[in-house]
Image (cartoon, grey):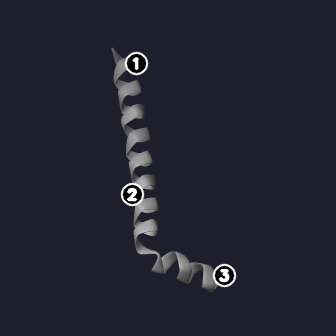
Amino acid sequence: MEELWLVLYWTGPIGVGFFLVCIGLMVDLLAKARSLEDSSKK
C-alpha cells in the first residue's frame, strides 16, 4: 500500500489534476443545487 501511495505522490501533475477535477465536480454540483433551490423558491 505504501508503494502505491509513493507512486501517486511522486506523479505530481496527475495527482494535482485529479484533485482539481474533484474540486471542479464538487463546485459544479453545488452550483446546480443552488440554481435548483433558487428556481424552486420562485
| Residue at figure coordinates x 37%, y 45% from the top left | 27
Circle 3 sits on which residue?
Answer: 1
Rendered location of residue 30, percent (x, y):
40, 40
Question: In terms of secondary structure, where does tag 3 sit?
Answer: loop
Q: Amino acid at mark 3?
A: Met
For the point 44% across and 46% down, which residue is it?
25
- Give the side of residue 3 with respect to residue 32, left or right: right
Give the number of marks: 3
Q: Amino acid at mark 1?
A: Ser
How far across and down, in percent of the image, does residue 40 sit?
Answer: 40, 18
Image quarter of the N terminus: bottom right
Residue name at image x 46 percent, y 60 percent? 18
How busy is the neighbourhood of tag 1: few (under 14 within 10 Å), some, or many (20 plus)?
few
| First along the sequence among labels 3 and 2 | 3
C-alpha separation, residue under disc 3 versus residue under disc 2: 24 Å
Q: Which residue is mark 2?
A: 20
Q: Quadrant of the C terminus?
A: top left
Q: Nearer the viewer, mark 1 or mark 3?
A: 3
Expressed as whole percent of the image width and height from the top left, the position of residue 38 reads 34, 24
Q: Amino acid at mark 2?
A: Leu
Residue on which disc 1 sits: 40
Q: Which label is found at residue 2? A: none
Quick one: 22 or 41, which is closer to the camera? 22
Q: Work out how far the residue at label 1 is from the one at label 3, CA to CA, in angstroms.
A: 47 Å
Mark closer to the observer (1, 2) = 2
Residue 6, image quadrant: bottom right
- Could you say whether the residue bearing mark 1 is in a helix, strand or loop? helix
Callout 3: 10 Å neighbours few (<14), some, many (20+)? few
Element marked by disc 2: helix
